[in-house]
Image: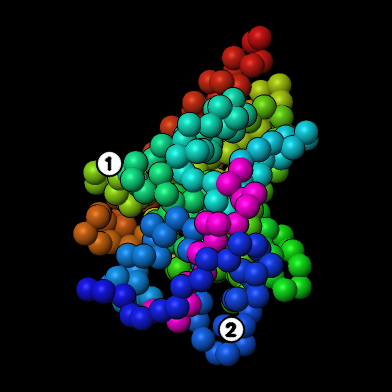
Amino acid sequence: MYPSRFRYEAPRSLTEAIGLLHTTESAGDQAKVLAGGQSLVPLMKLRFAAPELIVDINNLPGLDYHRADPDGTIRVGALCRHADLEHSALLASTQPTMAAAAPLIADPIVRNRGTLVGSLCHADPQGDWASVVVALGGSVVAQGPGGRRSIPADAFVTGPFENALAPDEIAVEAVIPPPQGVPAGGYLKLERRVGDFATVGVAVALDTAGGTVTRAGIALTGVGGSTIAATEAGQALTGKVLTAEIIEQAAGLAAQAARPRTDHRGSAEYKRHMVRTFVTRLLTRAGQAAEAERAA
């Protein structure tokens, strides 16, 4: 199937791109932003999406970065590809949860073109990056005719394939706050085959000091209508040492937060069990690292 007819624009500046979106929205038409296109193009080919205008932002300068500020804040530009993050020395040395997730995004073809920010905007309930950024307490920077604003990641995804952007805004950057101690954690994903969407995914992001958890975030992929922040599970860890009892409690709370449905990928009971298993596994690894930190 071929896409519906659409107009294509490739602006050379962010101001021009926002202007195109604003004009189109004011006329009552729909516009879509194209960065990697790994989600948008298939939707258009199947005619699940039929925008009147495509605004290709790949010619915009200065958006293909990922970097750390002096205070440890990590910034990922809208045109930074999954593959850039997969091979990032910065993430490998400073951000274990993001480093663990990057190689698990889809397949090499998608990773070479798709972007983290685009994945957040697509808001697929089975998308991996949203859970990672939520677990890390991150945010998305949007820019529109009125300037820039920061949207917390746990408020950015508003539902299945829905986000908090206004029609004339562009998500220009994802921001990960600096750690409050030694960062630990990871991302585990159950998939039917390599490159598949997540049947279940779990992101755990911890900061520890002297073996005690100073900040904790847990978020879930594929077990609800949108990304789920397992807030109570994270709160159960904060200020605690990762003992077997604390880990079991947090894993149970994360499983309770899941809202899985039985489908061709597995039963709801099975998916909830996998949430518990993955949280236990990630926290146990983090506990072992924290124990080594205390002993050092």
Q: Position of residue 138 (x, y in %)?
A: 64, 50
- For residue 194, which numbered disc appears in the image? 1
Q: Residue at x 50, y 81 (%)?
A: 30
Q: Going by the picture, which residue comes out furthest to the top?
A: 296
Q: Residues within 10 Å of mark 2 (few under 14, many from 20)?
A: some
Q: Are marks 2 and 1 in contact (CB under 8 Å)?
A: no
Q: Position of residue 150 (x, y in %)?
A: 71, 60
| Magenta-drawn stretch contains 60 | yes
- Between circles 2 and 1, the one closer to the viewer is 2
Q: Which residue carries the number 2 mark? A: 25
Q: Residue at x 68, y 58 (%)?
A: 141
Numbered range of the magenta stretch:
50-65
**Of residues 86 and 153, which is closer to you in this image?**
86
Give the quarter of the image for residue 212.
top right
Give the quarter of the image for residue 237.
top right
Number of numbered discs on residues: 2
Labels 2 and 1: the sequence-earlier one = 2
Q: Position of residue 246 (x, y in %)?
A: 56, 34
In the displayed structure, does residue 144 sit left or right of residue 161? right
Q: Position of residue 51 (x, y in %)?
A: 44, 78
Q: Residue at x 65, y 69 (%)?
A: 16
> Could you tell me which secondary element the residue under label 1 belongs to?
loop
> Could you tell me which secondary element the residue under label 2 belongs to?
helix
Q: Amino acid at mark 1?
A: Val
**Of residues 7 and 208, which is closer to you in this image?**
7
